[in-house]
Image (cartoon, rainbow, N blue to C red):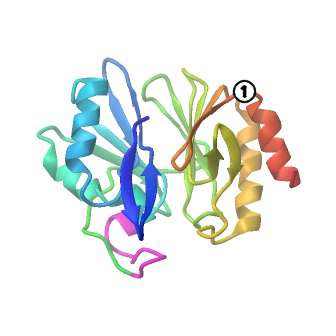
Amino acid sequence: TFELHNSVEGEVRIYRPTGIWDDRDAVLFDTGLPGYLENIRSNLKRLTGGRLNKIIITHQDRDHLGSLPEIINGFDSKIEVYTHEQTRPFIEGEKPLIRSGKAVPKVTVDHVLTDGQVLPLCGGISVIFTPGHTPDHTSFYHHATKTLITGDALTANEGRLQYSNPRYTLDKEGAIRSLKKFLVFEIETVICYHGGICKGNIKERIEELISGK
């Protein structure tokens, strides 16, 4: 994972796209707000030698897909776009983003994902449909490293898992119900787009959040 920084009304916000790669594929989860192409390119150069051939978008919020058009047009190689079937219309400009009411520049989705699907990428990535934060939200589990990539389904504060930010969560009860889907996976590491990396007692902490503790 790496950090993208932005200042909104004097408040510094940090976004954490995640990269997973092997000899064949270099996968990026989420792209930050518009304008992060060069930042992402420099981080990928450090991590993957500059390789990128897959992008997976967790949901339609602007801070997750904003730089997608720039990245698709800014790399010489073909980059395939993956997202859940409910997110596809937002990426392809058919629907306006829920929060802003504005459509984004169209990007073609190459692979439409469904809940429970296992992608044959980098040792296997499971698709976990986790609506709540937004109706289309999806999380991902990387089998080879036992890593859960939550998008905004969970946040973190100083290494401790927390609920999705209630200020931006459209269906709070639905978001908590979605957390139950994580319990079937053997998770050693959690990467939250807002908050970073968490390790240790992951299942127990998720169970606490589900029960309201």
Residue 123 is left or right of residue 69, and the answer is: right
Quadrant of the rendered image containing residue 39: top left
Q: Does the image show residue 52?
A: no
Residue 11 is left or right of residue 33, and the answer is: right
Q: Which residue is mark 1?
A: 200
Q: Is residue 89 magenta?
A: yes
The quarter in which the N terminus is drawn is: top left
Q: Which residues are magenta?
A: 88-101
Seen in the picture, residue 114 relative to 63 is either above or below; the reply is: above
Quadrant of the rendered image containing residue 117: top right
Residue drawn where x is 54% and y is 63% of the image:
136
Instruction: Kindly give the residue lying farthest to the top in the view shown.
Output: 23
Quadrant of the rendered image containing residue 2: top left
Amino acid type assigned to the residue bearing label 1 in the image: Gly
Image position, residue 12 (x, y; %)? 44, 57
Residue drawn where x is 56% and y is 58% of the image:
137
Image position, residue 84 (x, y; %)? 49, 55
The one nearer the camera, 146 or 110, is 146
Image position, residue 199 (x, y; %)? 66, 28
Total numbered badges shown on the rendered structure: 1
Residue drawn where x is 74% and y is 33% of the image:
202
